[in-house]
Amino acid sequence: MLFECDPNDGESTIKLIENLTTNASRIQQQVLDEIIARNSGTEYLKAFLHGNNTSRDLFKKRVPVVEYEQVKPYIDRIANGEPSSIVSAHPITELLTSSGTSGGQPKMMPSTAEELDRKTFLYDIQVPVVNQYVPGLDEGKGMYLYFIKPEIPTKSGLPARPVLTSYYKSPNFRNRRFNKYNIYTSPDETILCADSKQSMYCQLLCGLVQRDEVLRVGAVFASAFLRAIKFLENYWKEMCANIRTGELSSWIADETVRTAVLKIMSEPNPELAGEIEKECRLEPWEGIVKRLWPRTKYVDVIVTGSMAQYIPLLDLYSGGLPLVSTMYASSECYFGINMKPLNLPSEVSYTLLPNMAFFEFIPVEREEEAVAGECNGIGGDGDGRSPVEVVDLVDVQVGKYYELVVTTFTGLYRYRVGDILQVAGFHNAAPQFRFVHRRNVVLSVDTDKTNEGDLLNAITAAKRRLLHPLRLFLTEYTSYADTSSIPGHYVLFWEISPSTTMVDASVIEECCSVVEALLDSVYRRCRRKDRSIGPLEIRVVECGAFDALMDLCVSQGSSVNQYKTPRCVKSPEAIRLLNERVVGRFFSKKTPEWEPCRIGAM
Ligand code: AMP
């Protein structure tokens, strides 16, 4: 099989990667042949291939490149209990809820038991790659903060859940064989604890107790790691008290978690509690990661894409440890790994592994379409463009921009992921991609991905409901994700006319709440359940602020004729310019509703 390796044998793992990347073209062909042979009888492919196990060329000619809206009806039918064979020959075992949404609800991606093995493969090869540059990673543990999220019931009985929740609950994770590179300080019971507060407390406590063994720390995304640091700031005293007495706080109610944690704490350790207390008392918390876990060699968190906004805070808390983004993955499928883990975040690229799926690329012609340009709005490339041309993995060109299209083993065919990537170079014959941005996303603080349309709809509803009855009008708006404190929050800059009218604070506060209530379910889950996003803020700016913003954009090269107000600003100059013109700041006073709503007609 193309995705098996012995994770304890670093050398053979590296050889396998070399082999895969050297033979990228042949392996991609093999992958597509296998997908066609296996799935040509599915209802979806039959419509295009008429049930023939056809050639790769015919597949490309006949099967259209699609977006989620086109596959949604098929996936909805599976969620409602119709057979997997609609899209996949292998049984669909679960639906993975993406942080991308459709109609306010998470998109769902089909998955199979076999796909878990492919994911395991990608996890297994990562540490041996880092170990080439940071040796000795098999001589200690990793303090990783991993969490599960709620599942959504479907009529079919298949679980619908985020991809990481699926992985941690899978036998591949729970019954994993010993892997000297992947020994965690967190017992599985603490990761699998559904109560995120108990889970976080216990994982950090176990990390502190085993601090001398920790060689790397991390979480999947930078935002989650920083949330853990914030949690530690609030709870270190209680944790030290637990370590001192060897007793676990009584509010940790989950019995399996208690047993697992007490096994690690085993006995009172006043000396360790004293050492940790000494470090935590030292203000400010600069370098706290290095101080609490002195053997740590790097912080393993994704800091590319929207997570780049957290780099300054991470640098501060980690005391300048390398920030390593190891992998590029999604609910659709796992794509690839970073072969140069110690590269600076701005230089990180991911090598797409040719055995994970069949990859194609839509060239994104104009650079300004591809780059998340300040004055063009982030991800402002037109949706619904019909692709002129699609190129294979091995045919992409260095320096060019592309949108990723995948054909997976699990029932997605020529599916546009929505990520814009730039080719940074090649590892053997496999291209390496820099993640540029996600198409059309304007705001992201944690796993939320708010697009321009959803933001516009929410703002439109709020202004109609609350401003118009008062004869007030929203003349311009833009937004940015303020992550200078944890948790970050959305900020909207609003210019209201007539500017002479004094607006009651409660009106704008209510506008904040209405906007939040209308954002998609991932945003509302982050706000209500995960508490990984703070209350939304509206900053009302003085009249003329948006003219000044236009002047700034034009001075930076935007065309006056084609100027459109960016619906998201990122550059410090633009944010400063608007902040200097703020006349009032208002926050949402309500937490939006969120329910793990059922999918499919019940
Ligand atoms: P989800 O749909 O929730 O599975 O999120 C998958 C998306 O997260 C990808 O399509 C990317 O847009 C983003 N993502 C995943 N890994 C990375 C990474 N290493 N760097 C930047 N963005 C990433």
Image: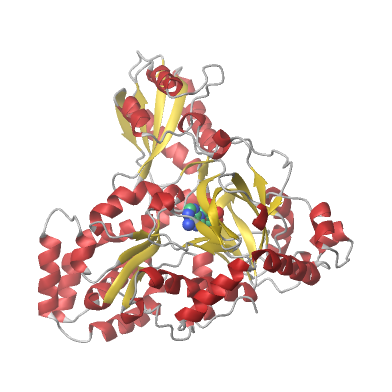
**Image point (45%, 34%), residue name:** 568
**Image point (37%, 79%), residue name:** 183
**Residue 388 sits in quarter:** top right
Q: Which of these two is toward me, 577 or 44?
A: 577
Counting from the top left corner in percent of width and height, residue 203 is at 31, 72
How many numbered badges does the structure rendering display?
A: 0
Q: In the rendered view of the protein, which quadrant contains the N terminus?
A: bottom right
Q: Is residue 267 above or below residue 350?
A: below
Q: Which of these two is toward me, 119 or 585?
A: 119
Colouring style: secondary structure
Counting from the top left corner in percent of width and height, residue 535 is at 36, 43
Q: Which of these two is toward me, 241 or 436?
A: 436
**In screen coordinates, is 121 left or right of 148?**
right
Counting from the top left corner in percent of width and height, residue 251 is at 27, 72
Q: Is residue 360 visible?
A: no
**Residue 219 sits in quarter:** bottom left
Q: Is residue 519 above or below residue 82?
A: above
Counting from the top left corner in percent of width and height, residue 323 is at 34, 58
**Image point (42%, 60%), residue name:** 325
Q: In the rendered view of the protein, which quadrant contains the C terminus?
A: bottom right
Q: Is residue 298 visible?
A: yes
Q: Is residue 319 above or below residue 190?
A: above
